[in-house]
Amino acid sequence: MARFELKLPKMGESVAEATITSWLKEVGDTIELDETVVEIATDKVDSEVPSEVEGTLTEILFEKDAVVEVGETIAVIETDSAEILTSHTKESEEIIKDIPKEVAEIEKSIETVVSDTASVISKTSESGKFYSPLVRNMARTEDISMQELESIKGSGKDNRVTKNDILLYIENRAKQVSRPVEIISEVIKTSNQPQKAAPISLNGGDEIQEMSRMGKLVANHMTDSLTTSAHVQSFIEIDVTNIVNWRNKVKDSFLKREGEKLTFTPIFMQAVAQTIKKYPLINISVQGDSIIKKKNINLGMAAALPDGNLIVPVIKNADQLNLVGMTKQVNDLANRARANQLKPDEIQDGTYTVTNVGSFGSIMGTPIINQPQVGILALGAIRKMPSVIETLEGDFIGIRQKMIVSHSYDHRVVNGALGGMFIKTFKEILESWDVSQEF
């Protein structure tokens, strides 16, 4: 018999850890080749870990809800082949060696830059320490400030603070008569600290529901973004009558030739990519006092899931796609997002996000920036509106198809001129649509 170590696989360059959500096998169970052993979740997507060998599960090294780093051994499988063990162990070691430390450090810095207050716990501290989602949630629940968290000695890999470290700290703190004077002083000095919500009274007809795991992640991501970026919005009204008429004319032939439904989304996404090429300083991230200009234009496309949650699949190198290619990408990602079939890499590395608030009837919205990006575009509902039409013979009132677009951007690095010119150019691209063009 040979011992095979099942490791947490690499799931994209920016994914450093995952949470174990469910073990599908128990110790003593027989495992088939490529059979799923455990389900995991990152802060982006759920996934499965299959076995690379046949054998018997002999050890489970992490319990449900444990946070595991990429490359760590999570289970042990006894196999009949020593050769399989050797080859797969070497392959796993090579995968781990290929994880660039520089990428991990940059990701830690870019993910979140938040105020160092008692009630806001960031993923990465000013000293460079990294805190997992589980540790941050425990710190928030127990009112552990960032200063306190920094003082806790971590027992995990690279001195990371673990769940057990937090529990031990809470136990020791409870034994103290009072908290240290310096901690109290720091809390008092924090004038912008959010006040703890008052308890909500319940009556017999009220129902308490636990937030879903993804719901908690989205909530934390949104509040972190508001703390990180100085949000500013610009709005513009766009006449899309020519686009509406053109789509109505070609959508049937498009479906017949390409086998894909032509919606407005790929048309707008293509225009966004063209606009970003004209204004590359929208396609950036902030790292401390430095700006990182992104080489590729990777458009995030916010998609609502059947359970009410939100996910943002990414169209990579969107500026290199024609309308047919963009349509295929949009339809494929949207369909697989709703079926929970996206791969981890397909929701990573977005550089700018577009959300269609108009699909729910909203005429406009003020979306929150998807960190570490610096801008997000909200497309409002397309409506028939009375409009002044200018002609050589004079002005007159007519019915036009219009929508309102809002652009939220990070005022730390994007000023009002750039933010406004960006959507003005987006408007010009759409309003100059050639109704005689082929697809």
Image (spheres, rainbow, N blue to C red):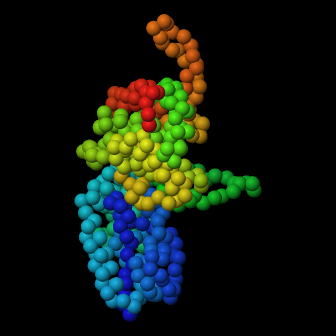
Residue at the right extreme, as displayed: 204
Q: Quadrant of the C terminus?
A: top left
Count of numbered badges drawn on the protein: 0
Q: Is residue 41 above or below residue 106?
A: below
Determine the residue located farthest toward the bottom in the rendered image. 1
- Residue at image point 55% right, 26% down: 401
Residue 216 lies left or right of residue 427; in this view the side is: right
Q: Quadrant of the N terminus?
A: bottom left
In this orientation, does residue 95 appear?
yes
* Residue ID at (41%, 88%): 78
- Position of residue 8 in the picture relative to residue 389 (left or right): left
Question: Residue 273 falls in which quadrant of the image?
Answer: top left
Foreground of the two, 150 or 109? 109
Residue 16 horizontal/vertical position (percent): 35, 64
Would residue 116 be visible to someone looking at this image?
no
Identify which residue, 40 or 382, lies in the foreground.
382
Residue 391, image x, y percentages: 47, 11
Residue 83: where, in percent of width, then height?
32, 87
Between residue 197 and residue 289, name the one nearer to us.
289
Q: Is residue 40 above or below residue 226?
A: below
Residue 224 spot, x, y in % from top left: 42, 49
**Residue at 41% from the left image edge and 38% from the top image edge:** 270
